[in-house]
Image: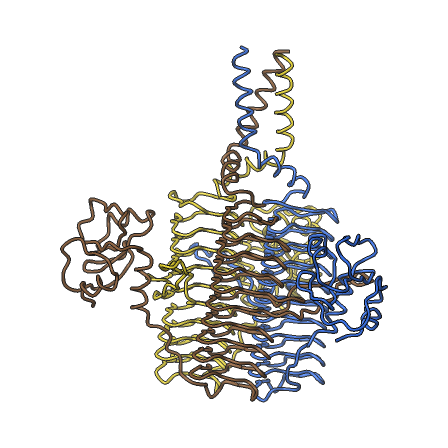
Chain colours: A brown, B blue, C yellow
Amino acid sequence: MYNIADVVRLTGGKLIGDFQGTISGFSPLNEATQGSISFYGNNKYLKDFEETKASVVLVDAETVVPPSYQGSTIVVDNVYLTVSKILDMLNPGLDWDEGIAESAMIADSATIGKSASVGHLTIVNKRSTIGSGTQVGDQVYIGIDCEIGKNCILYPGVRILDRSKIGDNVIIHANTVVGADGFGFAPDAEGNLKKVAQVGKVIIEDNVEIGANCAIDRGSLKDTIIRQGVKLDNLIQVAHNVEIGSHTVIAAQTGIAGSTTIGDQCMIGGQVGIVGHLNIAPKTSIQAQSGMIKSVKEENTQWYGYPAIPYKNYLRSYAQFKNLDDLSKRVRELEQKLDKKK
Amino acid sequence: MYNIADVVRLTGGKLIGDFQGTISGFSPLNEATQGSISFYGNNKYLKDFEETKASVVLVDAETVVPPSYQGSTIVVDNVYLTVSKILDMLNPGLDWDEGIAESAMIADSATIGKSASVGHLTIVNKRSTIGSGTQVGDQVYIGIDCEIGKNCILYPGVRILDRSKIGDNVIIHANTVVGADGFGFAPDAEGNLKKVAQVGKVIIEDNVEIGANCAIDRGSLKDTIIRQGVKLDNLIQVAHNVEIGSHTVIAAQTGIAGSTTIGDQCMIGGQVGIVGHLNIAPKTSIQAQSGMIKSVKEENTQWYGYPAIPYKNYLRSYAQFKNLDDLSKRVRELEQKLDKKK
Amino acid sequence: MYNIADVVRLTGGKLIGDFQGTISGFSPLNEATQGSISFYGNNKYLKDFEETKASVVLVDAETVVPPSYQGSTIVVDNVYLTVSKILDMLNPGLDWDEGIAESAMIADSATIGKSASVGHLTIVNKRSTIGSGTQVGDQVYIGIDCEIGKNCILYPGVRILDRSKIGDNVIIHANTVVGADGFGFAPDAEGNLKKVAQVGKVIIEDNVEIGANCAIDRGSLKDTIIRQGVKLDNLIQVAHNVEIGSHTVIAAQTGIAGSTTIGDQCMIGGQVGIVGHLNIAPKTSIQAQSGMIKSVKEENTQWYGYPAIPYKNYLRSYAQFKNLDDLSKRVRELEQKLDKKK
């Protein structure tokens, strides 16, 4: 399939071993067959490395190759970045129709950029603009007065509601909703809940990627803002007025309540809940399923728990929690001993 | 933009201070510029109040205005209700096309009410009815034998499956699914899971609002019922046979398992899980991320934890949990001291 | 409506009591009226059984009928399986149009099996195949090179992205996304996150049912695989490279992170989080909202907690957690007593 010399050149690494000829495929260690190339970048897969049938394995300089592995290696600077390069090569990419589909419904006042494509049964409403090179998939909805930048990809079923602004190189996966009303109600004089109009919008900056089936609500008065380079996984909830700082990464099913600000370069696990009106400092790391109920002022801290406390504290407390029944018994014994001594 | 006298009249409040002329805009305290109006209704924003550039701030009678604030105030009964009034004034509202779109596919036996609108590429199936004044957005699906009341709004991508009944003034946000099959399987003689037909339906009463990307399942035998005035945020799961009482408010990503009944006027936080076959009394308050595993009989109680226990108990226990490592050490010390005394 | 003799025959059970004539309806115990049949299969409903107005109740041989109940019973082997049979009889089923809708957009190179139907405004892309008897609903999207087996049902708004393979008898509920890109990024030399191409696909085997608004991501290099008979509830996240073993059942809003393998016949509650790169043994049972952070090697174990520990251990520890404030006070008292003794 690929000549080993070409692969080595692509990776920028150094071949150790005597493999020659062509590579037949690229697979994880436990699925690799003879003649194929694999990679090792996480010690959870050491056993797979020991038992792999791969003929070539990408490793980094620190890797200790298991004695049982008899094949060749390519030593690279960064295994995952190299894997990424190979995947780029293997990626079939999108093969969507070019141009504007006949069945797309585009308002007269909408503007579609040069070399942009608009899919079948997609709707682009009044005064919305789509930047050049952007691929809007099939069955997408773009509301009124939206701005979509250049070289974006909007997958089928995405709904971009009125007045949303989306930057360049943004990818939004299928069935995600951008710009639904925030969740705002105020009790009236009779105590009935009255809807509070949500007049803000959603702003998504450049190089953001948003997963499938997410909900990014518009702001109530100010805007909901997702800064450049943010990566959101699937099924994430971003409430009104939230701001997510540049290059922050958030795993699936996390929810951020209204008016909370998340700093730059945070790492937030899956199923995390962050209550409203907080400020989370840059580079904060939050363990999966944690519940943040207080602001974080210091940068570069780790959090865990429900509600979240510093990561190490939670681990320490939870280690004791597991033996709490035992601890309780020991306290009772102490009480009994002390009683006897009286 | 707006004359201050008009704004004071709209709010029904009393102007304190010497501001005159026109208001240039309406913004949160930290974003307000000179000449604009803002509001203060949550003491988390006291610092913003102290530093705001707003010229007029809405406050209530109890507010202590910070000495550093030199502008005017308007004293109102309820700050958030007043903000809501102003937002209503600022709200551009929906500007969807009137009438029935040419590309909409409406069954001959379906009935569309007077002044109702049906969007582009929307499907309305056999014998379904849509009440007058209702706005069905683009790319919506309405199944067979559905009833949609008056003055509803269904956003793009909403799927209303067969036999669902929806009252008046109901708002359903984009990509929400109403009436998918409940999750029911029974092991057959060979132990294989056999699908249990879900023959109930979904009933949504008047004045309900449902967020984006929610899933409200149809009943198995009885119906799934959402009573009047209920407000559901985004990405919420409502399983088969659930009943949610009037005016209950549920935050994003909460899930309610099958056959559970929630009382009226409950306040349920985000990411809460409620197991099946429970009865939750009216006015129950459940903290975000809690797991309810038992019914609540008494009204007006607060719950927190995993599994949930009374709110204050959880706070008390968790305060100790944070120092559990220390407590464990102290028990060990006691044991050692007592050993020495022997 | 139905003759009692026919109903008894359908259930394969034995009538105890003197009920004769026709059954007027089938309802839960607390909603049943005179002349109707109901069922009792969960002791949470004993009070409903005591007070029911039903004339006939399905029970199993172990059921102790409450003395207050004066009606007849039908004794069956498995109450829920019998209910399932009756529901099948009552099920109106789908009444979708047959054949290929005129508004469906089907690529020339796509293949639609005999007696398959394709709904209105549905898109089937290049080289995709749809098996005979499969019903593809309205407004569905099927990407390029997809294979959909026989007798499947795809509900409105489902998005099947490129290269997905789906077996026979698969049901996928509305607005679920199959085959979105996995969540993979690698920092480049400048520390910016670079998207890692996701070149794997999703494979769904026979007899799988997937709820509404789920997200099943394609693999990065290998495939994401959902084995035969798996049942997924709504709003579930399945990340790239995950494999879910045969007949495993997962409740709503659970998330499984990348490259984790779940064994056969596991029972996983709602809102569970399972971190990446784990192996969960067959028949593992995980309580709702638990967080799995370690692999499970032994079959047939139960887990609970955050992070999850063995089920009974969690219950024991949590029982003490509820009294942690008290335990802390007792330790303080011990310390004081011991201090005095010095």
Most foreground residue, C265 or A319: A319
Most foreground residue, A17 or A225: A225
Q: Position of residue C133 (x, y in %)?
A: 42, 75
Residue B226 visible in the current orientation = no
Q: Position of residue B31 (x, y in %)?
A: 66, 63
Instruction: Identify the residue at image location x=63%, y=25%.
Output: C330
Vertical arrangement, residue B125 with respect to residue C63, above or below: below
Quarter of the figure that contains the N terminus of chain B: bottom right
Most foreground residue, A29 or C214: A29
Q: Position of residue A271 (x, y in %)?
A: 52, 54
Callout count: 0
Left or right of B252? Residue A300 is left
Instruction: Identify the residue at image location x=18%, y=63%.
Output: A4
Vertical arrangement, residue C309 with respect to residue C201, above or below: above
Instruction: Identify the residue at image location x=64%, y=51%.
Output: B278
Residue B71 visible in the current orientation = yes
Most foreground residue, B172 or A230: A230
Q: Position of residue A10 (x, y in %)?
A: 25, 64
